[in-house]
Image (cartoon, rainbow, N blue to C red):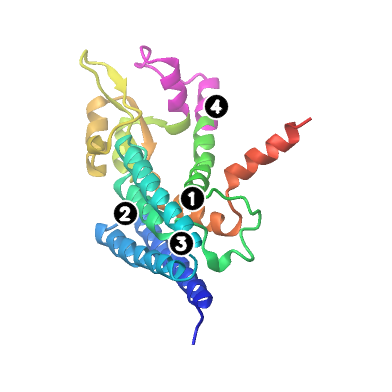
Amino acid sequence: MLGLNSLFTITSLFKALLLMFFLGFSSWSDWRTREVDDRFWLICGVLCGGLTGYELYLLYITSFEAFTSMATLTAASTVLCFLFGLSFFYAGLFGGADAKALWCLGVSVPVYPYAFSNLLPLTRVLLPVFPLTVLLNALITVIPVSLYLALRNTWLLIKGKPLFKGLESESWLRKLALLFIGLKVPASSVKSMKYVFLLERRSPNGGKSLKIFTSSSENTDFNEVGRLAEQLGGDVWVTPALPLIVNITIGYLLALIVGDVPLLIVLRVLQLLRP
């Protein structure tokens, strides 16, 4: 008969792998369609969250101190992931599926999976609330895309292309942000671009204005973007709709194997700066 420690280890391993399956499948769906069925997240949350509850039960009958510690971290993880997901969703930084993925992480892996803790992560650098490490890792994987856009746009500016024509009234800060998140393309070509959002809209005076961050309720259907771009005419700014669940999945794998990459970088820099 399996002991409680063995049961806890097996449950932890099964849950971590089950979550990987859900993230992998949702990444495939997000890559193909930029959508994930809501029922998928419901199943993920119920199954993985239920396993977290079972882990808490095993701790409760084994060590009340360990139970209290994990219960506190589970509550913190659930609340923080819900708040971050909701905030990013309404700020336009996350789509609905991205927010739900973060919510599932919050109840599924509130702490680093016990099954791997003897060998991994390699750096031993983690935040106490494990999903926040996953989120930071996911965000850092987006940086190469932003750097590419910034380099491309800077090169076009050096070549003399009027990237901000019609947007002269916009602040320098908004223009700077635009360099890192957008592409300026002919309006007529937007219809053939599969997954992009417009970063411009018609202003009340008949000109153009930027809409860098929009709430989820304002996000236009991909099928409408081409038509709206043609209404604006000329060249327009667009931003790629990234399949962020792919980044979250990569962030999860990095967190399991390596640890908290951004935190590790910060710690290494501080060590170098130390006199």
Q: CA distance from mark 3 to mark 4?
A: 56 Å
Looking at the image, do the residues carrying marks 3 and 4 touch, with CB atoms under 8 Å apart?
Answer: no
Judging by the rendered image, the residue that carries numbered circle 1 is 129
Q: CA distance from mark 1 to mark 2?
A: 31 Å
Type of amino acid at the residue the image marks with label 4 = Trp
Judging by the rendered image, the residue that carries numbered circle 3 is 67
Judging by the rendered image, the residue that carries numbered circle 4 is 155
Along the line of sight, the residue nearer the viewer: 194 or 113: 113
Whole-percent x, y for residue 66 in the image: 50, 61
Q: CA distance from mark 1 to mark 4?
A: 41 Å
Q: CA distance from mark 2 to mark 3?
A: 41 Å
Q: Residues within 10 Å of mark 2 (few under 14, many from 20)?
A: few
For residue 162, say whether it is visible: no
Q: Residue at x 45, y 26 (%)?
A: 177
User: Which residue ends up furthest to the front in the rendered image?
Assistant: 64
Badge 1 element: loop
Q: Which mark sits nearer the N-terminus, 1 or 4?
A: 1
